[in-house]
Amino acid sequence: MIKLFFLGTSSGKTSIKRNHTSIYFQFDNTNLLVDCGDGISKSILQNNIPFNSIKNIFISHLHADHFTGIASLITQMKLENRSDELNIYVYKSFVDNIKFLLGSTYMFEEIIGFKINYFPLEFENEVFVGKDFSFITKKNSHIKKKNELINYSNSFFNSSSILLKTNSKNIFYTSDIASTEDLFLFKEDKIDIIISEITHITIDDIYEALKLYVPEKIYLVHYDDNIENNITNWISSQRLNDKIVLAKDGMLIYY
Ligand SMILES: [Zn+2]
Ligand SMILES: [Zn+2]
């Protein structure tokens, strides 16, 4: 059984009523926390997930609403006397950024009391976090344009979308993207569930994804407070309530 837990659904804009987007997946006896933005420790507490039960963390890119909460999360694990190893999966050139952030908050491995295993990711390689639980990342164009403005290493502007695979369902999570094309990154795959952001693309793009993938369900996340009503109204007006769901913080789904 897959447990799909929406810990936060807000966009990069901090919201009083919702946390930044983060999703917790549990399958068999393992789990994967996808993205660790600002405030993640509070989101985890609000949803009654013990900090030290988290086994694997994936970070899609380095915007603050997806990444910077890792320092406070590791701090909470230390304060709860964690002893189990923790696995962190991130695009290969971002490993040093994470180590630097943790070091900048004194969360050195010699201090925290548990081992962190870093798994430097290559795009399009399948990575197993459990016997029947794996994922594949692909590069999307979310922060590609920044590369034209700033003279910096190309790979620093990489951002990942992720396909989670179990022996029962394939779940495509866009994370932050920038175009309709990014929605179709996994068009060769059978997709059962889509979790898509809805800040950098339009609801019409989502409709195209619905037609192409024909998934069981599309969950929308990463939205501003001021577009919440528009999205809800659009879904109703198109009579797509059974197909497209505007996810809410704390929403828990089992498959
Ligand atoms: Zn974001
Ligand atoms: Zn972003």
Image: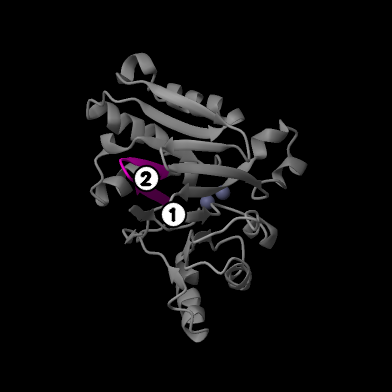
Residue in front for this viewpoint, 251 or 232: 251
Residue 80 percent coordinates (x, y) = 22, 30
Residue 63 in sight here: no
| Residue behind label 1 places its C-beta within 8 angstroms of ligand 1 | no
Image quarter of residue 129: top left
Q: Earlier in the sequence, mark 1 or mark 2?
A: 1
Q: CA distance from mark 1 to mark 2?
A: 10 Å
Residue depth check, mark 1 versus mark 2: number of the one nearer the observer: 2
Q: Secondary structure at mark 2?
A: loop
Label pair 1/2, CB-CB below 8 angstroms: yes
Residue 116 colored magenta? no
Numbered disc 1: secondary structure: loop
Q: For residue 199, what is the image quadrant?
A: bottom right
Q: Residue at x 70, y 44 (%)?
A: 146
Question: Which residue has dot 1 on it?
Answer: 14
Q: Which residue is mark 2?
A: 39
Residue 231 seen anywhere in this rendered image of the structure? yes
Q: Position of residue 165 (x, y in %)?
A: 48, 48
Query: Label 1 crowding class (10 Å Cα cut-off): few <14, some 14-19, many 20+?
Result: some
Q: Is residue 102 left or right of residue 160?
A: left
Q: Is residue 13 above or below residue 70?
A: below
Q: Is residue 93 above or below residue 27?
A: above
Q: Where, quadrant-wise, is the C terminus in this rendering?
A: bottom left
Q: Residue at x 75, y 33 (%)?
A: 151
Q: Tell me which segment is drawn in magenta.
A: 21-33
> What is the count of numbered marks?
2
Could you say where residue 144 lies in the image, as x and y percent from the top left? 70, 46
The amino acid sitting under disc 1 is Thr
